[in-house]
Amino acid sequence: MMFIAILIFISFDGPVQEKGYALTIKVGELRNSIGVVQFALYNKEGSIPDERFRAYYKQGTAPITNGATSITFDDLPKGRYAINILHDENENGKIDKGFILPIEGIGFSNYESIGLSNRPKFSKASFELDSEMTKYVTIIYK
C-alpha cells in the first residue's frame, strides 16, 4: 500500500512551468556617453506613454559605452511587450522637458520618430515575444 502511495505522489510533479524567454534591447547612436539609459518594458494595453515611469512591467538601467548600450530581461513569459527607453543624461530617472518636448533622448519599440501625428501607443509599439529575441530601439532627440 505504501508503494502505491509513493507512486501516486511521484507522478504529480505539480504545475508545469512555462518556459521564460530572454529579451535583449540594444540602442546605439546616443549623442554622448553621459548618464545612463533607462529601459522600461510594458505588457498592457494603455500603459504607454508613461512619462513618470509608473506603469512598467520591468525596468532597468545600463551604462553607456561609446554611444551605445544594451540590457537583457530574462525569464519573461510569452506575450505582447512594448519598450520605452530614456537617455537619462542627468540620471534623475525622469523625462526632462523644455517647453513641451523632451530635452533628453527617448525611444519606443517600432518607432523611428515621434510627433503629434505619431504619438506613442502600446498597440503600435508592441511585439510578440515567444522566443529569445533582440530588439533595436531608435533613440530620438528633439
Image: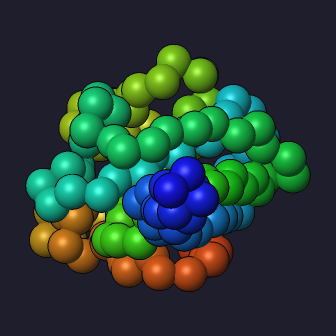
Count of numbered circles in the view? 0
- Residue 1 appears left or right of 44: right
Vertical comparison of 137 with 1: above or below: below
- Residue 91 appears left or right of 79: right
The structure residue drawn at horizontal position 61% and vertical position 77%, both measured from the top left corner, is 133
Vertical comparison of 63 with 77: above or below: above
**Where does residue 56 sit, x and y in percent of width and height?**
33, 42
**Where does residue 135 sit, x and y in percent of width and height?**
58, 73
The colouring scheme, among rainbow, by chain, secondary structure or one colour, is rainbow
- Residue 33 appears left or right of 126: right
**Where does residue 110 sit, x and y in percent of width and height?**
40, 76
- Residue 81 visible, this orientation: yes
Q: Residue furthest top?
A: 92
**Front residue of 27 and 130:** 130
- Residue 136 visible, this orientation: no
Q: Residue furthest front?
A: 1
- Residue 83 appears left or right of 19: left
The structure residue drawn at horizontal position 69% and vertical position 30%, both measured from the top left corner, is 35
The structure residue drawn at horizontal position 37% and vertical position 78%, both measured from the top left corner, is 127
**Front residue of 129 and 48:** 129
Vertical comparison of 73 with 33: above or below: below
**Where does residue 89 sit, x and y in percent of width and height?**
61, 30
Q: Residue furthest right?
A: 66
**Front residue of 136 and 34:** 136
The structure residue drawn at horizontal position 53% and vertical position 46%, both measured from the top left corner, is 39
